[in-house]
Structures are given as structure tokens and as C-alpha cells.
Image: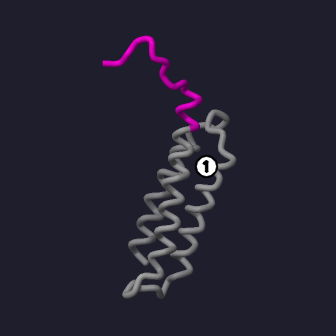
């Protein structure tokens, strides 16, 4: 049971924490995607596409971790990258 005297996180703090978490997740994805090319037996005929997706993930991660101020952006800040990640995953699987 929560203590009523305990201060909860403010909405701005929660949005900044969510932006940092999104940055960490996209950084993990970008680095993992790039490192997959180094594994033996992995098809690498479309390495440019794979590396492009990895660079896009790292770039969005850097933006989230260093420059983003979620309170200044609308819903696009959350929904567009989440939607685009579906296409990134599809691109990874297809190549």
C-alpha cells in the first residue's frame, strides 16, 4: 500500500524519464543490430540497409538522451518513433 505522505513523480519528471528510457532502448537496438552483422553465418548481402537502420536507431537515441524535451513536443514525440519501429523490425527481418 502506498504511503500518502510520499511524494510521487511529477508529470514532467515522468516524461523525461520515459524519454531517457526510450533513448536507452533505441541505443540497445541500434548497437545490437550493428553487431549482428559480425556474427558468423548471418546473411549480410544487404548490410547497407541493416547499417542504415542501426544508424537511425542510434540517432534517435542520441536525440532522446541529449536534446529531447518531451514537454515541448506533442504526441508525435512518442507515437511516430513507436510506429516507425514496427517498420524497422520488418526491414530487419526482410533483409
Furthest residue toward top? 5
Q: Residue 93, relative to residue 43: is it above or below?
A: above
Drawn side of residue 72 relative to residue 12, left or right: right
Secondary structure mostly seen in the magenta stretch? loop
| Magenta stretch, residue numbers | 1-16
Q: Quadrant of residue 69?
A: top right
What is the crowding at mark 1: few (fewer than 14 residues within 10 Å), some, or many (at least 20)?
many
Q: Position of residue 4 (x, y in %)?
A: 41, 12
Q: Residue 94, relative to residue 29: is it above or below?
A: below
- Residues 60 and 14: in front is 14
Q: Residue 27, relative to residue 65: is it above or below?
A: below
Q: Residue 88, relative to residue 78: is it above or below?
A: below
Residue under the point 47% across and 64% down: 88
Is 13 magenta? The answer is: yes
Furthest residue toward left? 1
Is 17 magenta? The answer is: no
Residue under the point 49% across and 60% down: 28
- Please tell me whether mark 1 sits on a helix, a strand or a loop: helix
Residue under the point 54% across and 68% down: 54
Q: Position of residue 45 (x, y in %)?
A: 48, 88
Q: Which residue is mark 1?
A: 64
Residue under the point 55% across and 61% down: 57
Amino acid at each position: 500500500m502506498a504511503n500518502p505522505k510520499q511524494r510521487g513523480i511529477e508529470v514532467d519528471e515522468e516524461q523525461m524519464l520515459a524519454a531517457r528510457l526510450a533513448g536507452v532502448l533505441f541505443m540497445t537496438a541500434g548497437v545490437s543490430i550493428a553487431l549482428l552483422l559480425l556474427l558468423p553465418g548471418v546473411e549480410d548481402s544487404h548490410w547497407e540497409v541493416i547499417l542504415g537502420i542501426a544508424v537511425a536507431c542510434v540517432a534517435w537515441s542520441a536525440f532522446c538522451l541529449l536534446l529531447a524535451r518531451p514537454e515541448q513536443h506533442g504526441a508525435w514525440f512518442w507515437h511516430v518513433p513507436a510506429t516507425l519501429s514496427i517498420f524497422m523490425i520488418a526491414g530487419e527481418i526482410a533483409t
